[in-house]
Image (spheres, rainbow, N blue to C red):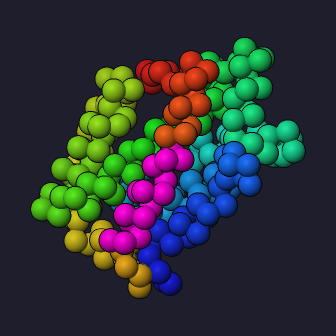
Amino acid sequence: MEGTVFTPCLEGMTSVKSNEGEMLTKPFLDVCKLVLPVIDKFGAAMALVKSDVGGNISRLESKYSSSPSEFNLLYSMVKAEIEAKTAKASSSCTNGLLWLTRAMDFLVELFRNLLEHPDWTMSQVCTDSYGKTLKKWHGWLASSSFTVAMKLAPDRKKFMEVIGGTGDLKADMEKFCTTFSPLLEENHKFLASVGMDNLKAS
């Protein structure tokens, strides 16, 4: 593998914004898709996250495909749903974008923990990241399934070897966190501005 598992994501992030600085739908979803192989390396521990992320990407993609010119900008889907008063539905793209962004927050936090706490085990890394990001939005059921899944986290050393490839893993991981965070932050700000940032899971 040329570079690390993060290399494709980092390349993808360079084209997420339009020249006017607006978030583009397809490039943003493509970057999220490129994160899926990283999630894969966690095996069973991240099966829930992976199916959640995959489902939300598909939902947003099919909306985008229905009218690429209309939904070229990521937030146009949300605006359309707010006008149609469907944004709060659990199957809405607004909900999809919110949960996709939250799942990505969790992953960024996870990689940050791997960088900052070299002595932590993988399950400590996962549990701490979960506590800082997704936990407050999850109901009891989602929370308990997550806690169980975290016990299946792979061995840290093995995981780092698997995602390392031939590149500079630490540098790429750091770049991934610092480049992706502001994009996710922007999604949160937008969703907060339209009152859609506090939806919880059952």
Which quadrant is the C terminus positioned in?
top left
Q: Which residue occupies 67% across, 53% down? A: 17
- Name the foreground residue: 26 vs 150: 26
- Name the foreground residue: 20 vs 71: 20
- Name the foreground residue: 113 vs 142: 113
Return the residue found at the far front: 20
Is residue 175 a member of the stretch shown in magenta? Answer: yes
| Relative image position of residue 82 (x, y in whole percent) | 71, 19
Q: Which residues are magenta?
A: 170-184
Is residue 132 a member of the stretch shown in magenta? Answer: no
What secondary structure characterizes most of the magenta part?
Answer: helix
Q: Which residue occupies 59% across, 43% down? A: 55
**Residue 121 is drawn in which quadrant?**
bottom left
159 to 183, vertically: above or below:
below
Residue 60 in view: yes
Q: Which residue occupies 37% across, 72% down? A: 171
| Relative image position of residue 124 (x, y in whole percent) | 18, 50
Return the residue found at the far left: 119
Return the residue found at the far top: 85
Residue 48 in view: no
Q: How many marks?
A: 0
**Residue 41 is drawn in which quadrant?**
bottom left
**Residue 201 is drawn in which quadrant?**
top left
Relative side of 56 to 124, left or right: right
| Relative image position of residue 16 (x, y in whole percent) | 65, 55
191 to 63, vertically: above or below:
above
